[in-house]
Amino acid sequence: MLIRILIGAASALLLGSCQSGEAPAPRQAARMVAPVLTGADAIDVHSYAKPLEARVTHVALDLNVDFATKRVGGTATLDLQAKPGIDSITLDDKGLQIAGITNADGKPLPYKVGAVDPILGAPLTVQMGDAKRIIIRYTSAPDAGALQWLTPKQTAGKKSPYLLSQGQAIENRSWIPTQDSPGVRQTWEAKIRVPKALTAVMSAPKGAEPVTDGATRVFSYKMDKPVAPYLIAIAVGDLAFRELGPRTGVWTEPAMLDKAAAELADTEKMVVAAEKLFGPYQWGRYDMLVLPPSFPFGGMENPTLTFLTPTFIAGDKSLTSLIAHELAHSWSGNLATNATWADFWLNEGMTTYATTRIVEAVYGPKVAAQQVALGHDAMRAAITENGGPTGPDTRLHLDLKGRSPDDGLTDIAYEKGAAFLRTIEVAVGRERFDAWLKGWFSRHMFEPVTTSIFLADIRQHLIKGDAALETKLALDAWVNDPGIPANLAPADPQAFAEVDAAVTAFKTGTQPTTEAWQRWTTDEKLRFLTRLDKKQPTARLAALDQAFGLAKAGNNEVRFAFLTLAVAARYDPAVPALEQFLLVQGRRKFVRPLITALAADTTWGRPIAKRVYAKARPLYHPVTTRDLDKLDLIASPSAIL
Ligand code: BES
Ligand code: ZN
């Protein structure tokens, strides 16, 4: 990798031509500055920033966390680089209340907030003149899309409030005024003031030791590697920490610590396996934060501190491929980052592929082969859900203009992306593919990447002019065409031989034996449930439920798979368990499809959806309620914050 130290020649950096060998500007601290890409496919339609004119290189936050008003507020000090002759910079803003903007000497600078777009928010343009640093005084709005403010009742301990953030894809502009584009990497630091009894954790190494000041405590964090701004994350609550390995550990509420630590016991092994596969881990520590159940995702790869739903805790480590996934993002996503959300598959598809490789190294080839097979089922389902084999949204490289980046959050990115990489691996052989993959991460470390960069890299470093291989791989068809290319490397048809036979037997009336069900792994149970016909007679669901206790299964993925069948079949006896499931956790992957399916069933399901959503909404994160509110289940959702 090039040595990317801070260089005085700002325009060279803006154009992405940061070369080693140029002299650092005098008296400026050496700081890594990652170049911004110039290609047409690197233009981010989800940000107002014009980084080729003026860009943010560093963000320093000094914020107070106020649970009473549900606001974070204080200052954001931004370090800037601008092309000669450019005297204004455009940032992203979603609902921020700005009190004033000055230069480093406190001189007020003119600024303007432009028209608000419901998806993107508004451009915030600051006339900085020749200032290299600006200071923005602001507070976030109580309904900031990135932040969720939990009452003590919504936590495990029931005593303290809790704040959590979720930045991906374009939420961080609701609490950090910066250029919120994954192609504009920034180093950052933060001072966070919270009530004395609480702890603030962030996605960066600890800065200074926390300082108590009257009734408050100030925590410091500092990320000296340039990261995409969606990766800045915070959580504040009654938190405790436990060491898991030399560089791994877990943060969570004290009441959750034993359970969380037991479930995460394999983490250090995973880091060792991942380093062997992808190269040295670049972020220092790998800690995890197990959040309250309203966290909207399974996991989020915030650097140095993966955020996790507590719903992955099954008691038997059977859902820990989630950890392998978030850990893999430490390379695919956090080192080499999609420059825009149109290339989201480069984050998630590569990570899904890498997850299976970590799982194979830690849990063996059979488990990995089964996960590949489940992935192929999910890919095919996503093709069906996205308009079939000719649907434009079944392409890896997406057109998201005028749309939310969330529209790209499908198993096309995850599973078609992973299937593409596995197809290449099988075609060239593992050894050769692995050498390329390690090389890819080291060549693009701390850099934004696009599909065209990916293709060029594969051609230069893997295909190397081999025309027969070029034809065999069908790279362009994979990234540009809808559907599944013909050269897909198939999943092992024997991966689930016993379960698939049980699915066939079920069709003719035979249910799996209790012995079989209890012996099956979680993935085997999921294969069984997801392969059953969607509309089962209620008597058959009742028989399954009675035999295996599925509506109340302790494993949340199994429970979700069964409840999905229950809703499709209008299976009344599962309704109390369904209602409870929707009220105790707010993971979007679980609650959105269930509530959406209920809402679509106007006679049976919709009344249930209305009743449950009215009660559940306060538990859910804004990124979850934003979609569910569109179902018009409750009169004025925002009134019941
Ligand atoms: N980075 C994603 C979560 C995400 C994607 C949040 C896009 C917002 C926008 C994370 O790594 C992820 O993929 N989580 C999955 C985990 C799973 C695939 C193992 C989830 O939350 O379900
Ligand atoms: Zn992911």
Image (cartoon, rainbow, N blue to C red):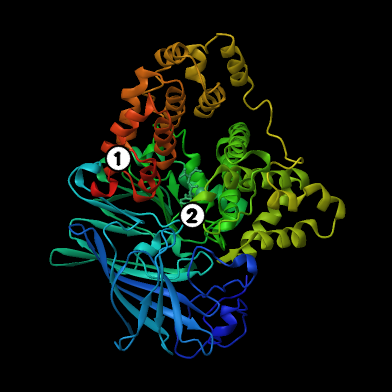
Amino acid at the residue labelled 2 = Ser
Please give left or right for residue 440 compared with residue 145 in the image: right
- State the residue at coordinates (71%, 59%): 455
Number of other residues with Cα within 10 Å of mark 2, as a class: few under 14, some 14 to 19, many 20 or more:
some
Number of callouts? 2
Residue 64 lies, in percent from the top left, at 24, 66
Q: Is residue 445 visible?
A: no
Which residue bears the numbered disc 1?
Answer: 634
SS of the residue at dot 2? Answer: loop
Residue 544 lies, in percent from the top left, at 45, 15
Q: Kindly give the residue lying farthest to the top in the view shown.
A: 509
Number of other residues with Cα within 10 Å of mark 1, as a class: few under 14, some 14 to 19, many 20 or more:
some
- Residue closest to the eye, 24 or 235: 235
Front tag of 1 and 2: 1
Residue 300 lies, in percent from the top left, at 44, 51
Amino acid at the residue labelled 1 = Ile
Sequence order check, earlier mark of 1 and 2: 2
- Quarter holding the N terminus is bottom right
Above or below — where is 355 with respect to 365? below
Please give left or right for residue 544 compared with residue 195 in the image: right
Ligand 1 has an atom within 8 Å of the beta carbon of the residue at disc 2: no
Ligand 1 has an atom within 8 Å of the beta carbon of the residue at disc 1: no
Please identify the quarter of the rendering in which residue 580 is found. Answer: top left
Q: Is residue 418 visible?
A: yes
Q: CA distance from mark 1 to mark 2?
A: 23 Å
Above or below — where is 292 with respect to 521? below
Please give left or right for residue 379 compared with residue 314 in the image: right
- State the residue at coordinates (69%, 31%): 492
Which residue bears the numbered disc 2?
Answer: 404
Please identify the quarter of the rendering in which residue 70 is found. Answer: bottom left
Q: Which mark is residue 243?
A: none
SS of the residue at dot 1? Answer: loop
